[in-house]
Amino acid sequence: MRIRTVDAFTDRPFTGNPAGVLLFGPEGFPEDGSLQRVAAELNLSETAFAHPLPPGGAADWALRWFTPVTEVDMCGHATLATAHVLHTTKAASGTVRFAARCGTLTSTVRPDGSVTLDFPTAPLTPEAAPAGLAEALGAEALSVHDTGPHIGDLLVELEDEATVRGLAPDFAALAARSRRGVIATAAAAQGGAYDYVSRGFFPRVGIDEDPVTGSAHTALAPFWSARLGRDELTGLQASARSGLVRTSLRGPRTLLTGHAVTVLDGELLVAP
């Protein structure tokens, strides 16, 4: 069975967010424990598993995502990586519809090779900062929003870009203060290639810091579109690997666009 590692939300190898991708046949997925063991073995923030569905249905492929320790409801970068693999291997073409735990998602490969994902927009609900959040994160929040059921993060607005870049969280303390993780964000320091910055911390699901989090941008897009007055934005996730996510807000849906690069293509020698 072929197993690939794809760097997502980047056009350069060894940057962006690496995702594992395994494509199964029409017989479907093996049992959940097998998928979790493969994801733990790869030890990437997420590994995507997909198999084709019968023609004529509401979706073309079934898609699931696992961190090294658990299955998640939604993952942007591993969906982009899967769409990239389907396109480059000619397993699928055009727009692909995925059946996932969070509903039906679509991907479309553009002429420049970038991939646009159509995801549900996260509902943002203002809330008070949990006790101890500032100490765990290492900075005071200007505002805090819950991001709804599929993401389950706290979106935390900080004073400026330098504050976001300089964070050194206490991950154990941070894990106790959200359902999945914390997205820290601020406006870009100056005009240029991006409009806002973010960093994503998800210690509850085995990821201290995620390099580039596509799903987080379904919350970042409405948050910053409301503040900046534009529906078309670009976010920079300021991790060590870094990556750009272009967002287009379409009411209840958010379009996420980025590139991807396959960096490893091998064979899984042990049946999952």
Image (cartoon, rainbow, N blue to C red):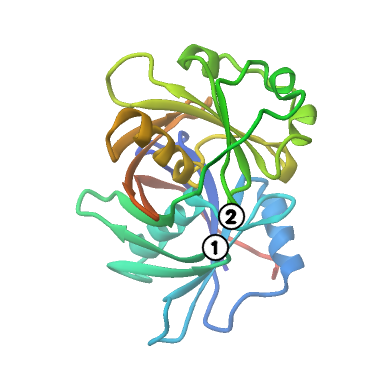
The quarter of the displayed image where residue 130 is located = top right
Q: Residue at x 46, y 73 (%)?
A: 61
Q: Are marks 1 and 2 in contact (CB under 8 Å)?
A: yes
User: x%, y% of residue 172?
Assistant: 80, 30
**Label 1 crowd (10 A; few <14 / some 14-19 / many >=20):** some
Q: From the viewer's side, name the closer residue of 214 and 14.
A: 214
Up the image or down, 182 lies above or below 91; here it is: above
Disc sitting over residue 102 in the figure: 1
Q: From the viewer's side, name the closer residue of 100 and 212.
A: 100
Q: Is residue 157 among what the camera can see?
A: yes
Q: From the viewer's side, name the closer residue of 13 and 60.
A: 60
Question: Label 1 vs label 2: CA separation?
Answer: 6 Å
The quarter of the displayed image where residue 13 is located = top left
Q: In the image, what residue type sits under mark 1?
A: Cys
User: x%, y% of residue 43?
Assistant: 67, 46
Q: In the image, what residue type sits under mark 2?
A: His
Instruction: Tell whether 150 sits left or right of 9.
Output: right
